[in-house]
Image: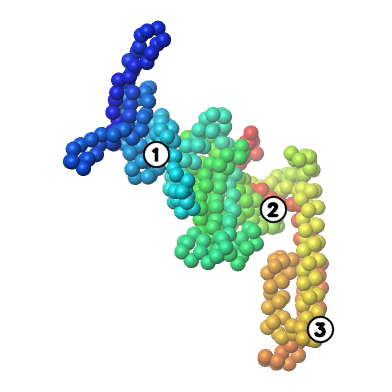
């Protein structure tokens, strides 16, 4: 297809007319008699500000969209916007052709172009509203699928955030700025670990950023690893993250404890320090939150209560005629309970008394006790967490 030009005249209302050029997207074809014919595919209007080379490029883009059914990208914003605008005139489709499969196929084509679309939309919005991205928030979620999903490479068994470990899931990684605008999205296999996505996702931003100042990547504990933070620093990013486990490694570097009120009016206390991470001293901030402490204590007490109720149910099975008593079956029930309540089990000592041998070995009694030392250790850290950062104390986050 090519662009043809016609001369038209615009009435000025005073008995005179002004000539102007009018363009159409035209297609050549051979009729049944073997003669070359031409037909108008799309009226493009006057195309003000487009030279001959740009009109030819526009024709090529529209040809790809119309005849090949493919999305297009272009290094010229003006050309891209014109192609998108003109293509809207071709979007009318009979209702009977708008099927589920047709929509699925359109979604695939959109996904093939999602990186370019994300970049274009992101740059457009940042430019319109003068957004400077000094802070980037990186996180991951997942979604489960009912069914076997045998033909999907992405759908795999993993840790479902919706507690559907019986279903296969896919992982969605997302980077947003402090305005809530998506900067980058990527989809991964359901069994992909959080920490293995940082370099790939943030790496696409390192290659495309035009900012002169360092950007700060804020991420959860699951993303922390020495290789990730070293990669971030080597590629021009600072980071803030949560210490992956416990705070026994924290060493204060200041005796000063700063009282602070967060943006929800809740009291927190801050203390500067450092943490030894595999031989490297990393700047750290201890955060002690009253509200978080109260919530975690309540959750811990409720979990302990439900765990003990589960132990009571196992004990009842042992003491009740016809209940679960066999050695393997009892251990299986306890293992299932331990898995459900995770670290709570570490606060308890559970003891069984057995009689018989081999397949005839059965439990005759069961006792448990709370390990107060472990429970006290857990309570000690309720409401407290540690932030690790590459930022200097003098740097303002703005």
Q: Is residue 336 above or below residue 270?
A: below
The quadrant in which the N terminus is found is top left
The quarter of the picture where residue 74 lies is top left
Q: Nearer the viewer, mark 3 or mark 1?
A: 1
Say whether disc 3 or disc 1 marks the residue closer to the N-terminus.
Answer: 1
Q: Nearer the viewer, residue 134 or 48?
A: 48
In space, the residues marked 3 and 1 are separated at their CA atoms by: 72 Å
Q: Residue at x 78, y 81 (%)?
A: 317
**Label 2, on which residue?**
250
Q: Are marks 2 and 1 in contact (CB under 8 Å)?
A: no
Q: Residue at x 41, y 10 (%)?
A: 13
Task: Indicate left or right for 185 with 375 as reference.
Answer: left
Say whether disc 2 or disc 3 marks the residue closer to the N-terminus.
Answer: 2
**Label 1, on which residue?**
73
**Label 3, on which residue?**
319
Q: Nearer the viewer, residue 270 or 336?
A: 336
């Amino acid at each position: 297809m090519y662009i043809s030009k016609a001369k038209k005249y615009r009435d000025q209302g005073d008995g005179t007319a002004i000539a102007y050029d009018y363009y159409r997207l035209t297609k050549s074809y051979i009729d049944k008699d073997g003669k070359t014919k031409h037909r108008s595919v799309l009226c493009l209007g006057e195309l003000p500000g487009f030279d001959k080379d740009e009109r030819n490029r526009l024709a090529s883009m529209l040809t790809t969209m119309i005849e090949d059914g493919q999305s297009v990208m272009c290094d010229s914003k003006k050309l891209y916007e014109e192609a998108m605008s003109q293509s809207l005139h071709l979007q009318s489709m009979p209702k009977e052709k708008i099927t589920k499969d047709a929509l699925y196929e359109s979604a695939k084509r959109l996904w093939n172009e999602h990186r370019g679309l994300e970049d274009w939309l992101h740059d457009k919005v940042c430019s319109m509203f003068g957004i400077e991205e000094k802070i980037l928030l990186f996180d991951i979620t997942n979604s489960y699928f009912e069914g076997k999903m045998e033909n999907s490479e992405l759908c795999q068994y993993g840790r479902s955030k919706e507690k559907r470990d019986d279903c296969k899931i896919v992982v969605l990684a997302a980077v947003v700025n402090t305005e809530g605008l998506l900067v980058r999205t990527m989809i991964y296999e359901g069994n992909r670990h959080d920490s293995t996505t940082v370099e790939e996702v943030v790496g696409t931003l390192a290659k495309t950023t035009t900012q002169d100042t360092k950007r700060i990547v804020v991420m959860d504990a699951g993303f922390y690893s020495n290789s990730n933070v070293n990669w971030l620093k080597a590629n021009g990013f600072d980071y803030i993250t949560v210490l992956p486990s416990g705070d026994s490694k924290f060493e204060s570097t200041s005796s000063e404890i700063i009282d602070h009120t967060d943006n929800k009016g809740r009291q927190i206390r801050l203390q500067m320090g450092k943490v030894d991470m595999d031989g490297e001293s990393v700047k750290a901030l201890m955060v002690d939150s009253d509200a978080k402490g109260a919530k975690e204590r309540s959750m811990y007490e409720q979990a302990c209560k439900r765990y003990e109720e589960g132990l009571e149910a196992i004990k009842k099975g042992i003491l009740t005629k016809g209940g679960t008593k066999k050695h393997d079956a009892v251990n299986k029930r306890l293992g299932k309970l331990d898995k459900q309540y995770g670290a709570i089990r570490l606060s308890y000592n559970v003891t069984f008394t057995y009689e018989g041998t081999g397949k005839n070995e059965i439990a005759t009694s069961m006792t448990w006790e709370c390990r107060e030392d472990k429970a006290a250790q857990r309570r000690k850290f309720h409401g407290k967490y540690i932030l690790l950062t590459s930022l200097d104390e003098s740097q303002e986050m703005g």
